[in-house]
Image (tube, coloured by chain):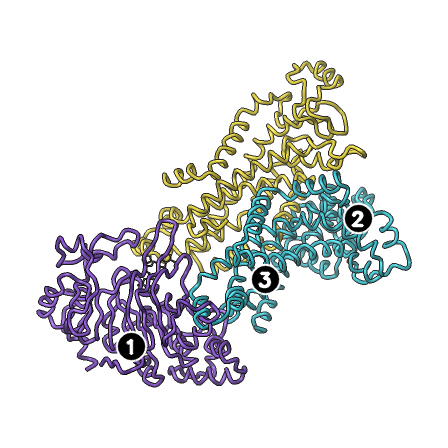
Chain colours: A yellow, B purple, C cyan
Amino acid sequence: MNRIVKKLLSNTTSLIGLILLFVFVIIAVFAPIIAPPLFSDPYQIPRMSWDTEPQPPGFPLSDDMIFIYESMGEPIIRDKAIFGTAQGGYDIFYGLIWGTRTAFRIGIVTVVFSMLIGVILGSIAAYFGGWLDELLMRITDIFLSIPFLVAAMVLTTILGRGLDKVMIALVFFGWMGYARVIRGSILCAKEDVYVMAARALGVKDYSIIVRHLLPNTIFPVMVQASMNIGSMVITAAALSFLGVGAPLGYADWGQMVSFARNWIIGSPGHAGEYWYAVFFPAVFIVLFVLSWNLVGDTLRDIMDPRLRGEL
Amino acid sequence: MVNDNKTKILQVKDLKTYFFTENGIVKAVDGVDFEIYQGETLGLVGESGCGKSVTAFSIVKLLDYPGKTVGGQVFFRGEDLLKKNEKQMRQIRGKEISLIFQEPMTSLNPVFTIGFQITEALKVHYKISKPKAQEKAVQLLKKVDIPIPEQRINEYPHQLSGGMRQRAMIAMALACDPVLLIADEPTTSLDVTIQAQILELMKTLLKEFNSSLIMITHDLGVIAEIADRIAVMYAGKIVEYTDTRSIFYNPLHPYTYGLLTSIPRLDMDIEKLDSIPGLVPDPLHFPEGCKFHPRCPFATAKCRKEEPVLKEVENKHLVRCWHFEKVKEEAKKIAFTGRLAVSE
Amino acid sequence: MLSYIIRRILILPLILLGVTFLIFCLFSLLSPMERLATYINDPSVLKNPQSAQRLIDKYHLDEPFPSGYVHWLKSLLRFDFGWSPTANQPVWEAIMQRLPATMELVLYSIIPVILVGIWLGVISAVHHNDILDQFIRVTAIIGWSLPTFIFGLLILFIFYGMLGWLPPGRLSTWAQYIVYAEEGFKNYTYFITIDSLLNGRLDIFWDALKHLIGPIITLSYISWAYLLRITRSSMLETLRKDYIRTARSKGVDEKTVIHQHARKNAMIPVVTVAGMMIIRMLGGVVITETVFTYPGLGFWAASSAQQLDYGSIIGFALLFAFLMVVGNLIVDVSYALIDPRVRLE
Ligand SMILES: Nc1ncnc2c1ncn2[C@@H]1O[C@H](COP(=O)(O)OP(=O)(O)O)[C@@H](O)[C@H]1O
Ligand SMILES: [Mg+2]
């Protein structure tokens, strides 16, 4: 483990990844200080005005809104939208800062749960073999027969809008890769002498799995998981972008991009007028995914030295 | 056994092949000389990593990157191969000089049929037609004692056993009746009974084809029955070079002596088998003086400082050692006849 | 070979059965009433509990598991996928009408990647070409971290917003008028780029192409990255194999060594990646078409999802699952074509 940490720190790309990741963690942790919430639900992005079209960075809180807040008895904490506002007057800066928390939540929760399901099913299939293995693997095949994004989109649509629904959908269709990996490596490890020995001594099945097989096979799965966090966040953002993800006004990066969709072209004669509406959300998403990918790629290099140096 | 009146097929002179790696220059072959006559077999012996394969690949100029032959000459029928360009070399490879490799598993292409691979050299060099090639493939497989060759030619390498694959490799190498065969540890990856069969087969075929052979191996036992002369290699250099008989009855180099004591013998207990202590030195950090001295029981202060040269100390018996006389004394105490007796 | 393909095709119905069952399970998460809504084109019927119950019975929507599934499956076999309020036509019709647009986009994305991508990957492994290597490295990094919807918006922003070259949609208004309304324009394939040429309308061909380029790039950039990368590294690895040296030792010339001995072996992992790529593309279609308001299946599916048009979204999922199963079949057969170890198993 020490060796891995050292490797991660000594490699430039993974170091960049780790630094980026650290910055995002800071943003997520200190979100209430960086962008103090106005409502009891901090994930509700405050609106700076009722304008339909986006407003440029530095746009001040509109009189309408000041009036509303005053009548609600709320203190006015911020009077400017640093990154501008998205369609509907939503504060882009606020949405991105709190969206960082959303991104971490989606990434980590979905990956942990799908890994858990995958590990359980995969190790059962590999350990017991026979018809159970056959059955579980066919089920895996069937789950893999619907394109991931399509499957997630269908399930979220059926379950209804909401971040929890998105996460359920991502977990429901996201465990198969782990199941296959863990099954493969357990099948290899199973042949090893120490498992045979444990069996011969009459150790119970589940404790063979938990004590002997998993510790030796879990690491490749963890690497795969860390690399999947980025793609889970992308998929969740894509669902929001398609309008089936986070509810309207929820602090979510995908939603911020979908706000920008209609304005990307600009108005006649002012091409790119609303660049900020897509630029800032895009930067957040891309850097977040990049940071996980950089770290994950280095982990994979450490795991599989054969791939090192290939690109 | 050695007949100087025969035509000289190959003469390697002061061959030097280095690998220019990131960590430094690896002198894999560093000044090797030997020659082979028509119909003769030369054994090239040494532990793994001492430069045998690189010597072979240098002769046919099939070195891996970053290897480069930096000096010497390789006269093949009087012409220096090192002066030839790639196109001229291609006309020699597979037609006049062919190779047999160690791993029949990985040396055959998994996606082509045996028949295709055996006759490829024929197609390349003689442009023969397809039905002719089929016919020839069947003949060749018959020669190497593969049963039902008509069926085998349409099969793929993974459908054959290891021994069968090596037979197919031999058939492939013999396709164009080469003048010189280079077999790089052809039996190493096979189990013992199959090893013996393959060796027997090679012996028969050599006689039939009257080809010369360079037989590379790390096992002196393998070579006793097939080689006319033996060159013992260590750390990129030849340390002893003479006829097979003398190697076994009269070894003069402590490395040869060590190799001989590690051959399993019928008249000796397995337990008494002692291999040479220590490891082949790291080619990036060869020791000073004689490269064998760290492992040599005869080593003295001189060995640590000065590297001996290869010189003829007895009739046609070359050795690279300061203390060959001591070795001779020591070796006399044990007669290494167990193996040789078989072929006599 | 033939027996392998036949065996492989015989499994197809089983997988499809499994997939339909999975989708039926998802569908069953909806109440019978919600499911009923996918079958009727007049929502006012739902207001009357009695007539609604009659219809629920008619469509077997509240029957217990096996019979409900069987009835649903039967309706699928009759191509009765329900009604799409989003498209205002039956789901099956909506699918068939939009399929050509999507196929045109997908095929134009896949074919160049496979042909040119593999070729470029081989070239870059054989000759150490700095520009090509750099290109592969850059596409890999972009492909890796730029989500499709952001990449697509970027393309739209630059090539439409800034430069005005690549407009969204499938055709300009004037061309739509000719293609869909005019008597003289005949549809042979429903691929506009092909039909326009067959009708001798270069102007329409050019217009369709301009609309396609953005979506094609967006849908395929990730695949370029993956395929180039895997082809290159697989080729490099294969060229180090022992059997390559064997081929050279027979006097085979370098061109044959590379294009015959090495390439065929190097294609084995490439096929795997190409298969994954096709799957990614099927998902990517939804996003790409939405970004470019390209009127295909994906755009329709996204609109249906937003409007909770369950019938359409289920029909779409069934179709894409079917396409994916067929895609996997093609991948497996390609494997067998390349690798005798697979087909002789
Ligand atoms: N491609 C290569 N790059 C660097 N060094 C190499 C390469 N191939 C062989 N060598 C070096 O050359 C030496 C001799 O190798 P080889 O001829 O394969 O030994 P062997 O006698 O077992 O056949 C070894 O020390 C090895 O490290
Ligand atoms: Mg070797």
- From the image, state whether disc 1 or disc 3 is nearer to you: 1
Q: In the rendering, which numbered label is found on residue C331?
A: 3
Closer to the eye: label 1 or 2? 1
Query: Which quarter of the frame holds ligand 2?
Result: bottom left
Secondary structure at badge 2 equals: loop
Assess whether mark 3 and mark 1 are in contact (beta carbons under 8 angstroms): no
Distance of mark 1 from mark 3, alpha carbons? 50 Å
- Residue A159 visible from this viewpoint: no
Label of residue C87 in the image: 2
Residue C168 is situated, as x and y percent measured from the top left of the image, at: 76, 45
Of labels 2 and 3, earlier in sequence is 2
Seen at 73% across and 17% down, the residue is A68
Question: Looking at the picture, do discs 1 and 3 lie on one chain?
Answer: no
For marks 2 and 3, give the CA distance. Answer: 33 Å
Q: Residues within 10 Å of mark 2 (few under 14, many from 20)?
A: some
Relative height, residue C273 to residue C343 (above, below): above
Could you tell me which quadrant the N terminus of chain B lies in? Answer: bottom left
**Residue A240 point in image, percent of width and height:** 66, 38
Of all chains, the one bearing label 1 is B
Residue A100 rendering spot, x and y as whole percentages: 57, 31
| Residue B241, image quadrant | bottom left
Q: Quadrant of residue B312?
A: bottom left
Tell me where residue A153 appears, x and y as whole percent: 65, 45
Which residue is denoted by mark 1 in the rendering? Answer: B41
Tell me which chain the residue with mark 2 is part of: C
The crowd level at tag 1 (other Cα within 10 Å; few <14, some 14-19, many 20+) is many
Residue type of the residue flagged with mark 2: Ala
Question: What's the residue type where badge 3 is placed?
Answer: Val
Residue C251 visible to an observer of this rendering: yes
